Image: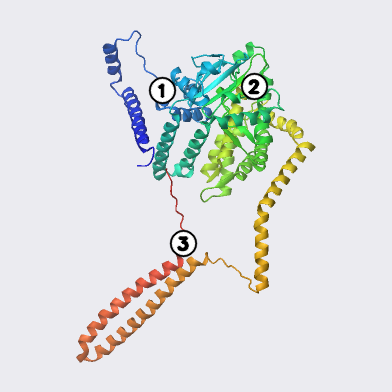
Amino acid sequence: MRPGGVAERLRLMQVYGVLTTYGIDMAFDRSPVAGFRRGMQQWLWRPPVPVQELPPQVKVRLLLQDLGPTYVKLGQIISSQGRALPAAWEEELSKLQSDVRPFPYEDVREIVTAALGAPPEALYASFDQTPLAAASLAQVHEATLADGRRVAVKVQRPNIHQQLRSDVRILMRATAVIERRAAWAEDVALSGMIREFGTTLLRELDYTIEAYNARRLERVLEPVGAVGVPAVEPKLSSDRVLTLEFVEGVKATDTAAIDAAGLDRQELARNLVRGAVKMLLIDGFFHGDPHPGNVVVQLDTGRLTFLDTGMVGELDLRKRVSLGSLLLVSRNRDVSGLAQTLLSLSTPFRETDERAYYKRFEQRIGPLMDPPPGERVPLKKVIPAATDVLRDSGYRLDSQLTLAIKALTQAEAITAALVPDAHGSDFAEMGVAAIEELVPEAVTKETIRAAARKQAMFAAREAVQRAPSLQTAAFRWLDQFQKGQISVKLDLSDLDRSVKRFDAISRLLAVAIVITGMVIGSAVAAVIATEDTALSSISDAALVLYAASMGIAVVLVVVLLWRLWRPTDRRRSRLDLD
């Protein structure tokens, strides 16, 4: 058995157990004996308050929490999309952003000691044993440094690596089964999405990467001014413990607290959009999960802070330009322009019909892009619906673009919560305004010189690395030239399949010629024998031989035609679950 196989089987049994428990409970609630069951519970347990039936969305949230961090993270991603969920389900699953069970302080102390070389009481002036918040992969404790500064200490959950790997393998096997039985799962590359999800989660478990992401995002957001990320304390951080600047604030969607503090929500929304544009369109390095729980407002300063920098994405220049074009056509309510922009960012995964795609896009997205006068274009509905049309038409966005569009719609959802009235500027309009403001600031003589210098240094390093091989190749060519022996290498690997194919066909032709001779010979023998009664026995044998030869000849003709017209390239796919 491969390493980790036992742990994976035990984890699978645990998952089955939790699913069975909740499945039976939900089945009873939907059965005719639900009332009898409640009565028996009251009689047996005699609770101090009446037992009330929980709604399905509450049970699903509790199910995800009992399944563990991997499934909680999946629930968080689903709730942050919010495009196909009823309001009650979206609201309940959004509690997964914060309502996760904490783990004991004894585990916290053990992890901090192992990661930093000393217990918390020796490293910090004070360390609150009660966690401030518990997330799917870690929990956060408030602490104080020797100089009096408040910090937040993020401590990874115990034994999370093995559990996460087992969960991802289980999900991969499940999606492989689904893909074999459902065409839609294969079309959307469900197993690839789960693999990407697992890879991202594993990267999130290395806090040295998160610390690097925080430093880089801080440099990206510095020109914006009112948006940033918490500063990292490198001496008190490792791969499992991360000490950050303590940021006290409220969720960016807590409009009541923001109004009570006297902050301008329109200005907050504008700053959020400027930060998103700077990350996504100017620098191409962006926060990959800006859900409301990860974006807080400091009520004393009005500063927006992006928490949890474990999930980030990167876009090259072409994708950044196309994403900016997406905002522009959304502001102009240009349906065909949006269809063209998304198509330019996609790759086909099956046979496609471009004309049918544009027609389907117009029918589905047109009504969403043309709201009543005075109302904004709802990007959080338009973009998911547009990507659905892409997928239904046989096109697919790559993972980084999907992450970028998700981040864009999450930022738009926060903006809509801050400025919900129709008179406020919509996200696309504010995004285009931010582009017009930030692009001239970003494209300066200094930045152009720095980019050119960077490219020149890269080209120089490549030339230096290749120089020895070029020199060796040149001297070798000169040696061969002096000897009068210039070797020419021809790659005939592509001809191998054709040669084998025609070799087989030539053999079939040779056999066909022999069979043709047998057919003709047996036919002549049969005719001669029928004219001479003395040769009647030969006639019977000749007829049998003639019939057999004709049968073999028909088979050979069919095989020959099949070999001539059969497809030469067969696509095969194999999913590596390990």
Q: Is residue 545 above or below residue 318?
A: below
Q: CA distance from mark 3 to mark 1?
A: 52 Å
Left or right, 455 with reference to 96: right
Q: Is residue 326 above or below residue 574?
A: above
The numbered disc on residue 304 is 2
Residue at horizontal 44%, vertical 18%? 106
Residue at horizontal 49%, vertical 67%? 496
Which residue in the rendered view is the most extreme toward the top? 48
Decide which of 454, 407 is in the foreground and name it.
Answer: 454
Percent of width and height locating residue 342: 61, 41
Percent of width and height locating residue 553: 35, 75
Crowdedness near tag 1: few (<14), some (14–19) or many (≥20) residues, C-alpha within 10 Å:
some
The numbered disc on residue 567 is 3
Residue at horizontal 57%, vertical 35%? 403
Q: Is residue 118 above or below residue 389?
A: above
Three-letter amino acid code of the residue under disc 3: Pro
Residue, disc 1: 62
Percent of width and height locating residue 353: 55, 50
Q: Is residue 257 visible?
A: yes
Q: The residue tagged with tag 3: helix, strand or loop?
A: loop
Residue 215 figure quarter: top right
Left or right, 39 with reference to 120: left
Q: CA distance from mark 3 to mark 2?
A: 59 Å
Q: Is residue 132 visible?
A: no
What colour scheme does the image use? Answer: rainbow
